[in-house]
Amino acid sequence: MTVQGLFNSLTFDDIMAALRCTHRNDRSIRNVAGYKEAYDIICNLSPEGDGGEVTFDISPREEWFTPHSLPLVANNVEGDYWENTVQKTVIYPNDNPFTDAELAGAILWGMTFYGFTIRDEWPPNDTAFSLYGEHAKLLERKLFIPYLRDKTIKQELKNEVLPFGIAFAMDMWNKIHQRQRHQNRSKRCRYRRISQRIEHLKKLDKRQYLINRLQEAFGPDAVSALEILKAEAIIEKWFDSHCYGKLPRLDYLIDLLENYCPYFDNICQSGNHNIVVCYTANTTPLTDDEKIRLRSFLSNHFSPDSNWQLFFATDNALPNEMAVQFIGIKTAI
């Protein structure tokens, strides 16, 4: 049986119930909205690639209930394209003590890197969205100059030819860490000062990117750029529908938020000012009925005296589907 065949033979609730049992010590099983989105994508993907096999590592039974122990782990599912993994053959363990749902749960856990969705994927290097980000990249290169002795590597660092930003060989990292342990007070202060500046610039870079997106979609007066830049914290969360024509897209999202996201009310209360943006494609915009239902649903979760806004935007990468972006702006008191 293939991974996709196994998933389609079970409901998501069956798999999640099993995962909560086998992976009870893992924090990712508390908020399962990401798992739900991933399950629906995996069940409907078109297979591509060379395939392969999925095997399982099983821990000794006496370790199943010890902290930080997992009874089983699926092999050959992490780090591969989902389109390829869905067609891999599931090899059942010898004297298999687990149900199909428990095996599927271990595969889902590994494929999603513990509940991450496509929106949460981690890029191999930081992307600069504004001058703040470009300045942060320059400072990152200056950060390690005092700990390098190789003139060639120093020149590569200055000329920005290293792959994936700052990417040294492991032996070079070991030398850098060794020299950092013996640095004087002046160098320690320099390193801390530049590191804090880099972190601040990266935060501003992401906020400027958010401002640019919102102002491009809704105009310069829709949101306050100063409010976002000076906020104490910005909490951003995405949810997508994955209906594949099987049910209404708004019903999918309401079900996802109410039944699979136990922290949804906390998301709605995450900021002093909350912005909700609903995205659909030009060819399938929200109907008037969908807009009314969405606003009514959100009104039931935002408190009556809270400051929140609902916007509608276009994303043509969402044919027949919809996505909702929650932005909580927490201002300094």
Image (cartoon, grey):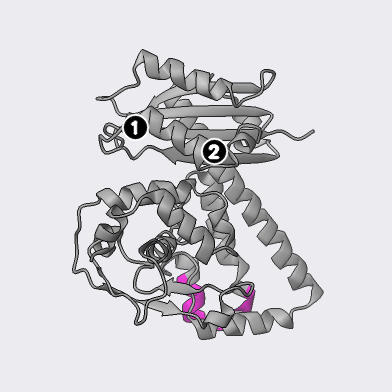
Q: Position of residue 245 (x, y in %)?
A: 25, 34
- The image quadrant of residue 249 is top left
The amino acid at mark 1 is Asp
Label ID, residue 208 = 2
| Label 2 packing within 10 angstroms: few (<14), some (14-19), many (20+) | many
Label ID, residue 142 = none
Q: Quadrant of the C terminus?
A: top right
The amino acid at mark 2 is Gln
**Can see residue 232?**
yes
Q: Position of residue 267 (x, y in %)?
A: 60, 37
Q: Position of residue 87 (x, y in %)?
A: 22, 63
Q: Look at 35% across and 78% down and name the residue there.
A: 93
| Label 1 packing within 10 angstroms: few (<14), some (14-19), many (20+) | some
Q: Look at 58% across and 22% down and name the residue there.
A: 300
First in sequence, mark 2 or 1: give its number.
2
**Where are the magenta residues, as a range?**
146-156
Q: Quadrant of the N terminus?
A: bottom left
Label ID, residue 315 = 1
Q: Look at 55% across and 40% down and name the residue there.
A: 236
Q: Is residue 312 above or below residue 179?
A: above
Marks 2, 1: nearer the viewer: 1
**Can see residue 220?**
no
